[in-house]
């Protein structure tokens, strides 16, 4: 069904916008500061940046406030903002090894070089409501921080970086290295500059997933995990931390670090394959802005799933997966059904009525004559 | 990131104003006023495939001090921080040692405070290092 534009309603539309703001203001609580959102609702901010594909924590927090907590809408706002900004260039390429670690675990190996670092995680919490947060006072915060800092004497600071866990497999020649990158390793595809076409290059696929919506990514990966696919992933390594951002200095040409971005990186090891030569493990890779472990893991699972030589399941079909992951695109398409479709729907309605009338006339035993 | 830049980026408004007062602003010429833009972050996967991770909002600025140019790119919409970083970069390429010492002395306590906090957090992280023991049946 097509969409036909309508006009009018300006006053009601303006008032509807004001009512949206009123919903946020009508309570008696103090206004939320953007900095509070940035610092205290940091996972939401991370998600908005990752799905909006723009690293700007303060603007993501502002968008989250404006969208009243709707991460899809907030990511949409960030994308709209980015469209107003010029591109200044590309950073130098950065590897996961460079991440300044705050969390790093492996589900494949108990003992990993450098050790496992749980870092800040909810993995081992019981998800019971913490009613003490109802009274989140500065005094309580201070007491918590003091207790947290106790007994640190004699504790050595965590090293900044760690070796990669998959190097264990690499050293033994247990990891398949080729990933079927048709366009070669040097050619980088940028989906913000070129339309995505299929089969997509590896760089295009990774970029598409890195900016995809967490729920969509997880859904497709979950279909594979549950049996509509046969990846059977093991998390070789999951890293959360800060990746330095370097550019080539325009005056000296030397690498110049402008800052660091928080990222999550996942490497999943999948069941061995024995298609050619000796059997080896294969790897799926996920990397995204912010602290978003389930997104990085789902991305890695789908990266591996799409390496299937003959796709049999939706999660293995590159075109199916990459075409449906973008939150802003799917939000836009889903939302457009709310727009007036009056003319085309009336047309359908007329056709349906005529078809029913015609059916009544031709169907034996139907119609007024037979009813009497 | 230079030590100067990391300290300037962590500064609050009052410290930025104090640093600005230290600088010979009449001698600093703005070559490129602060301008926001998007830097595409490129990552490398474990198989050496480069890909675009996403864009970063940055601010660029370029200044000149006594014939020396200073360039800065900082993260975020931060015109003041970009300008100050570029100005400090230009000054530190020159030979005004008195001014360099004065700026260095101003930034040193802030750098030390940042470094102490970073080390404290690394000690906290260290206490989450774990050695799981495998449970044996029977």
Image (tube, rainbow, N blue to C red):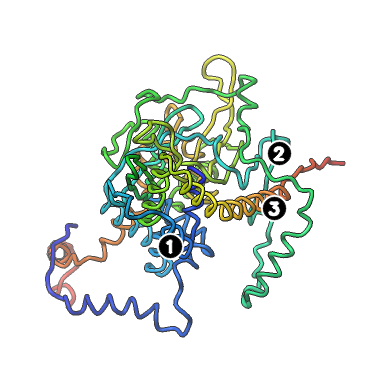
Q: Nearer the viewer, residue A196 or A111?
A: A111
- Give the image quarter of residue A281: top right
What x and y, as percent, mark residue A325?
A: 38, 47
The reply to the same-chain question for discs 3 and 1 is yes
Q: Is residue B14 above or below residue B138?
A: below
Q: Check disc 1: other Cα within 10 Å, few if <14, some if 14-19, many if 20+.
A: few
What x and y, as percent, mark residue A260?
A: 49, 46
Position of A166 with respect to A219 (left or right) is: right
Secondary structure category for the residue under label 3: helix
Q: Which residue is mark 1?
A: B17
Residue A235 is at least partly visible in this image:
no
The reply to the same-chain question for discs 2 and 1 is no
Q: Check disc 3: other Cα within 10 Å, few if <14, some if 14-19, many if 20+.
A: many
Residue drawn at (29%, 78%), measured in percent from left and top?
A18
Residue drawn at (47%, 39%), measured in percent from left and top?
A302
Query: Residue A324 bears which disc, if any?
Result: none
Q: Are marks 3 and 1 in contact (CB under 8 Å)?
A: no
Chain containing mark 2: A
Q: Is residue A166 above or below residue A341?
A: above
Distance CA(mark 2)–CA(mark 1): 44 Å
Q: Nearer the viewer, residue A79 or B121?
A: B121
Position of A296 with respect to B67 (left or right) is: right
- Single out the mark in the foreground, 3 or 2: 3
Residue drawn at (63%, 21%), measured in percent from left and top?
A171
Q: Which residue is mark 3?
A: B124
Q: Which residue is mark 2?
A: A115
Q: Nearer the viewer, residue A94 or A265?
A: A94
Position of B51 with respect to A294 (left or right) is: left
What x and y, as percent, mark residue A103?
A: 62, 46
What x and y, as percent, mark residue A360?
A: 16, 66
């Amino acid at each position: 069904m097509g969409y036909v534009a309508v006009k009018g309603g300006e006053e009601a539309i303006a008032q509807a916008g004001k009512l949206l703001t009123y919903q946020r203001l009508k309570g008696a609580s103090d206004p939320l500061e953007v900095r509070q959102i940035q610092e205290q609702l940091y996972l939401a901010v991370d998600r908005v940046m990752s799905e909006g594909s723009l690293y700007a924590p303060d603007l993501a927090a502002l968008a989250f406030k404006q969208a009243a907590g709707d991460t899809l809408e907030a990511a949409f706002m960030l994308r709209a903002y980015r469209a107003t900004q010029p591109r200044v260039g590309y950073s130098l390429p950065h590897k996961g090894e460079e991440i300044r670690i705050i969390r790093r675990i492996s589900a494949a190996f108990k003992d990993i070089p450098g050790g496992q670092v749980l870092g800040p995680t909810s993995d081992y919490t019981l998800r019971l409501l913490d009613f003490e947060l109802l009274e989140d006072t500065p005094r309580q915060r201070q007491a918590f921080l003091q207790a947290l800092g106790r007994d640190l004497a004699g504790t050595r600071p965590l090293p900044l970086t760690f070796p990669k866990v998959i190097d264990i497999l690499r050293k033994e020649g247990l990891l398949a290295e080729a990933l079927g990158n048709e366009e070669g390793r040097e050619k980088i595809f940028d989906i913000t500059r070129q339309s995505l076409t299929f089969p997509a290059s590896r760089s295009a696929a990774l970029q598409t997933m890195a900016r995809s919506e967490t729920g969509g990514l997880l859904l497709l990966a979950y279909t594979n995990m549950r049996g509509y696919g046969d990846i059977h992933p093991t998390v070789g390594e999951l890293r959360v931390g800060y990746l330095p951002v370097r550019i080539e200095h325009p005056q000296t040409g030397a690498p110049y670090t402008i800052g660091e971005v928080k990222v999550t990186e996942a490497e999943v090891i999948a069941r061995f394959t024995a298609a050619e030569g000796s059997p080896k493990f294969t790897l799926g890779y996920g990397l995204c802005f912010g602290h978003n472990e389930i997104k990085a893991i789902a991305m890695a699972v789908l990266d591996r799933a799409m390496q299937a030589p003959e796709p049999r399941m939706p999660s293995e079909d590159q075109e199916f997966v990459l075409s449906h992951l973008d939150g802003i695109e799917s939000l836009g398409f889903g939302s457009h059904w709310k727009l007036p479709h009056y003319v085309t729907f009336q047309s359908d309605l007329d056709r349906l009525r005529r078809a029913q009338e015609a059916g009544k006339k031709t169907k034996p035993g139907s119609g007024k004559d037979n009813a009497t | 990131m230079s030590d100067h830049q990391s300290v300037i980026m962590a500064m609050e408004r009052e410290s930025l104003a104090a640093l600005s007062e230290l600088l010979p602003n009449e001698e600093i010429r703005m070559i490129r006023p602060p301008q926001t833009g998007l830097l595409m972050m490129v990552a490398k996967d474990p198989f050496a495939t480069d890909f675009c991770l996403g864009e970063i909002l940055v601010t660029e600025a370029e200044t000149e001090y006594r014939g020396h140019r200073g360039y800065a790119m900082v993260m975020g919409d931060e015109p003041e921080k970009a300008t100050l970083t570029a100005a400090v970069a230009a000054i530190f390429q020159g030979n005004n040692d008195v001014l360099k010492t004065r700026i260095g002395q101003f930034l040193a306590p802030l750098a030390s405070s940042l470094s102490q906090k970073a080390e404290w957090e690394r000690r906290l992280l260290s206490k989450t290092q774990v050695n799981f023991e495998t449970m044996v049946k029977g």
